[in-house]
Image (spheres, helix red, strand yellow):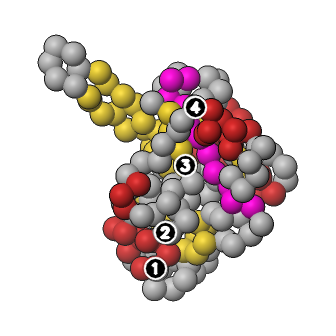
Protein backbone atom coordinates (compact mmCIF):
# COMPACT_ATOMS: atom_id res chain seq x y z
CA UNK A 1 0.00 0.00 0.00
CA UNK A 2 1.17 3.47 -0.83
CA UNK A 3 1.34 6.45 1.51
CA UNK A 4 1.44 9.50 -0.71
CA UNK A 5 3.15 12.61 0.54
CA UNK A 6 4.63 15.87 -0.62
CA UNK A 7 7.59 18.09 0.15
CA UNK A 8 7.33 21.85 -0.37
CA UNK A 9 10.78 23.47 -0.36
CA UNK A 10 10.21 27.15 0.38
CA UNK A 11 13.83 27.96 -0.49
CA UNK A 12 12.93 27.07 -4.09
CA UNK A 13 9.38 28.51 -4.18
CA UNK A 14 9.05 31.45 -6.57
CA UNK A 15 5.78 32.58 -4.89
CA UNK A 16 4.24 32.73 -8.37
CA UNK A 17 0.84 31.24 -7.38
CA UNK A 18 1.16 28.67 -10.17
CA UNK A 19 0.12 25.93 -7.74
CA UNK A 20 -3.16 27.67 -6.94
CA UNK A 21 -3.90 28.47 -10.59
CA UNK A 22 -3.15 24.87 -11.65
CA UNK A 23 -5.61 23.57 -9.06
CA UNK A 24 -8.32 26.06 -9.98
CA UNK A 25 -7.90 25.29 -13.67
CA UNK A 26 -7.91 21.50 -13.29
CA UNK A 27 -11.08 21.51 -11.22
CA UNK A 28 -12.82 24.39 -13.01
CA UNK A 29 -12.97 26.53 -9.89
CA UNK A 30 -13.10 30.32 -9.82
CA UNK A 31 -10.09 32.29 -8.53
CA UNK A 32 -9.70 31.90 -4.78
CA UNK A 33 -11.27 28.42 -4.62
CA UNK A 34 -8.10 26.40 -4.96
CA UNK A 35 -7.05 23.41 -2.92
CA UNK A 36 -3.81 25.34 -2.23
CA UNK A 37 -3.87 28.59 -0.25
CA UNK A 38 -0.97 31.02 -0.03
CA UNK A 39 -0.60 32.51 3.44
CA UNK A 40 1.85 35.22 4.40
CA UNK A 41 3.54 35.41 7.77
CA UNK A 42 6.06 37.79 9.24
CA UNK A 43 8.96 36.53 11.33
CA UNK A 44 11.31 38.53 13.45
CA UNK A 45 11.12 41.99 14.92
CA UNK A 46 11.67 45.42 13.39
CA UNK A 47 13.99 46.21 11.66
CA UNK A 48 14.77 42.59 10.81
CA UNK A 49 11.32 41.42 9.73
CA UNK A 50 11.09 38.72 7.10
CA UNK A 51 7.89 37.86 5.22
CA UNK A 52 7.29 34.19 4.44
CA UNK A 53 4.68 32.97 1.99
CA UNK A 54 3.53 29.49 2.92
CA UNK A 55 1.52 27.38 0.49
CA UNK A 56 -0.98 25.44 2.61
CA UNK A 57 -3.18 22.62 1.41
CA UNK A 58 -4.76 19.55 2.93
CA UNK A 59 -1.95 17.92 4.88
CA UNK A 60 -3.33 14.43 4.12
CA UNK A 61 -2.98 13.60 7.81
CA UNK A 62 -2.50 10.03 8.91
CA UNK A 63 -4.56 10.86 12.02
CA UNK A 64 -7.11 13.22 10.42
CA UNK A 65 -9.52 14.97 12.81
CA UNK A 66 -11.76 15.87 9.86
CA UNK A 67 -12.63 12.19 9.27
CA UNK A 68 -13.72 11.71 12.88
CA UNK A 69 -16.26 14.56 12.82
CA UNK A 70 -17.90 13.93 9.44
CA UNK A 71 -21.47 12.81 10.21
CA UNK A 72 -22.10 11.24 6.79
CA UNK A 73 -18.76 9.56 6.12
CA UNK A 74 -18.20 11.84 3.14
CA UNK A 75 -14.71 12.61 4.40
CA UNK A 76 -12.68 9.43 4.59
CA UNK A 77 -9.13 8.17 4.55
CA UNK A 78 -8.34 6.06 1.50
CA UNK A 79 -6.42 3.07 2.79
CA UNK A 80 -4.82 2.32 -0.60
CA UNK A 81 -3.18 5.77 -0.91
CA UNK A 82 -3.11 7.12 2.63
CA UNK A 83 -4.89 10.26 1.41
CA UNK A 84 -7.92 12.02 2.85
CA UNK A 85 -10.71 12.34 0.31
CA UNK A 86 -14.26 13.70 0.12
CA UNK A 87 -17.14 11.88 -1.53
CA UNK A 88 -18.95 14.97 -2.81
CA UNK A 89 -22.19 13.02 -3.27
CA UNK A 90 -22.30 12.30 0.48
CA UNK A 91 -21.23 15.77 1.70
CA UNK A 92 -24.12 17.73 3.22
CA UNK A 93 -22.12 20.94 3.65
CA UNK A 94 -22.28 20.96 7.46
CA UNK A 95 -18.66 22.22 7.60
CA UNK A 96 -17.71 20.22 10.68
CA UNK A 97 -14.61 19.09 8.83
CA UNK A 98 -13.63 22.70 8.21
CA UNK A 99 -13.82 23.41 11.93
CA UNK A 100 -11.89 20.25 12.82
CA UNK A 101 -9.03 20.91 10.39
CA UNK A 102 -6.23 22.56 12.38
CA UNK A 103 -4.58 23.77 9.17
CA UNK A 104 -7.59 25.63 7.73
CA UNK A 105 -7.16 23.67 4.52
CA UNK A 106 -10.80 23.28 3.52
CA UNK A 107 -13.30 25.63 1.94
CA UNK A 108 -17.04 25.72 1.46
CA UNK A 109 -18.15 25.97 -2.15
CA UNK A 110 -21.38 28.01 -2.07
CA UNK A 111 -22.24 27.03 -5.64
CA UNK A 112 -22.31 23.29 -5.00
CA UNK A 113 -23.03 23.46 -1.26
CA UNK A 114 -20.19 21.10 -0.39
CA UNK A 115 -16.72 21.34 1.13
CA UNK A 116 -13.68 21.24 -1.16
CA UNK A 117 -10.03 20.53 -0.42
CA UNK A 118 -6.80 19.30 -1.95
CA UNK A 119 -7.06 15.65 -3.01
CA UNK A 120 -3.43 15.30 -4.16
CA UNK A 121 -5.11 15.10 -7.60
CA UNK A 122 -5.63 11.42 -6.90
CA UNK A 123 -7.19 10.85 -10.33
CA UNK A 124 -4.01 12.16 -12.00
CA UNK A 125 -1.83 10.06 -9.68
CA UNK A 126 -3.86 6.97 -10.63
CA UNK A 127 -2.91 7.74 -14.26
CA UNK A 128 0.80 7.91 -13.34
CA UNK A 129 0.98 11.71 -13.31
CA UNK A 130 2.02 14.13 -10.61
CA UNK A 131 -0.55 16.39 -8.91
CA UNK A 132 -1.20 19.55 -10.94
CA UNK A 133 0.59 21.78 -8.41
CA UNK A 134 3.74 19.66 -8.68
CA UNK A 135 3.67 19.53 -12.47
CA UNK A 136 3.25 23.29 -12.87
CA UNK A 137 5.74 24.45 -10.20
CA UNK A 138 8.29 26.59 -12.05
CA UNK A 139 10.74 26.53 -9.14
CA UNK A 140 10.57 22.75 -8.75
CA UNK A 141 9.75 23.41 -5.10
CA UNK A 142 7.32 20.50 -4.86
CA UNK A 143 8.19 16.81 -4.76
CA UNK A 144 5.51 14.12 -4.63
CA UNK A 145 5.58 10.37 -4.15
CA UNK A 146 5.20 7.35 -1.91
CA UNK A 147 6.49 7.95 1.61
CA UNK A 148 6.50 4.19 2.21
CA UNK A 149 9.21 3.81 -0.44
CA UNK A 150 12.51 4.98 1.09
CA UNK A 151 14.01 5.31 -2.41
CA UNK A 152 11.21 7.54 -3.79
CA UNK A 153 12.13 11.10 -4.74
CA UNK A 154 9.98 12.52 -1.96
CA UNK A 155 11.41 10.26 0.77
CA UNK A 156 14.99 11.00 -0.30
CA UNK A 157 14.31 14.76 -0.50
CA UNK A 158 12.68 14.83 2.96
CA UNK A 159 15.68 13.05 4.49
CA UNK A 160 18.34 15.06 2.66
CA UNK A 161 16.75 18.47 3.24
CA UNK A 162 15.79 17.87 6.87
CA UNK A 163 12.17 18.70 6.16
CA UNK A 164 9.64 19.29 8.93
CA UNK A 165 5.92 18.87 9.40
CA UNK A 166 3.75 21.76 10.54
CA UNK A 167 2.50 21.60 14.12
CA UNK A 168 3.74 18.10 15.03
CA UNK A 169 2.42 18.60 18.56
CA UNK A 170 -1.13 18.20 17.24
CA UNK A 171 -0.57 14.49 16.59
CA UNK A 172 -2.21 14.61 13.14
CA UNK A 173 0.87 13.19 11.40
CA UNK A 174 0.67 15.29 8.22
CA UNK A 175 1.96 13.84 4.95
CA UNK A 176 3.06 17.27 3.68
CA UNK A 177 6.56 18.36 4.70
CA UNK A 178 8.30 21.73 4.40
CA UNK A 179 11.82 23.06 4.08
CA UNK A 180 12.23 26.65 5.32
The disc, 4 or 1, on the residue closer to the chain's N-terminal end is 1
Camera-side residue: 171 or 107? 171
Tell me if label 1 and label 3 are in contact, CB under 8 Å: no
What secondary structure is marked by label 3? strand
114 to 16, vertically: above or below = below
Q: Residue at x 38, y 74 (%)?
A: 96
Residue depth check, mark 4 versus mark 1: number of the one nearer the observer: 4
What secondary structure is marked by label 1? helix
What secondary structure is marked by label 2? loop
Tell me if label 1 and label 2 are in contact, CB under 8 Å: yes
The disc, 4 or 2, on the residue closer to the chain's N-terminal end is 2
Q: Residue at x 62, y 39 (%)?
A: 159
The label shown at residue 176 is: 3
* In the image, residue 96 lies in the stretch drawn in magenta: no
Residue depth check, mark 3 versus mark 4: number of the one nearer the observer: 4
Q: Which residues are magenta?
A: 2-12
The label shown at residue 68 is: 1
Q: Residue at x 37, y 61 (%)?
A: 170
Write down the quadrant of residue 18 in the picture: top right
Work out how far the residue at label 4 is from the one at label 1, CA to CA, in angstroms.
Answer: 33 Å
Tell me if label 3 and label 4 are in contact, CB under 8 Å: no
Residue to which mark 4 is pinned: 161
Amino acid sequence: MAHYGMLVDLTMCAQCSGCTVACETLYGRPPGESGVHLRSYERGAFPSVKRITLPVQCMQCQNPPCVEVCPTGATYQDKATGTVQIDQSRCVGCRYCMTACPYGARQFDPTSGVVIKCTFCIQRVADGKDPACVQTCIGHARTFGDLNDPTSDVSVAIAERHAIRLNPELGTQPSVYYVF
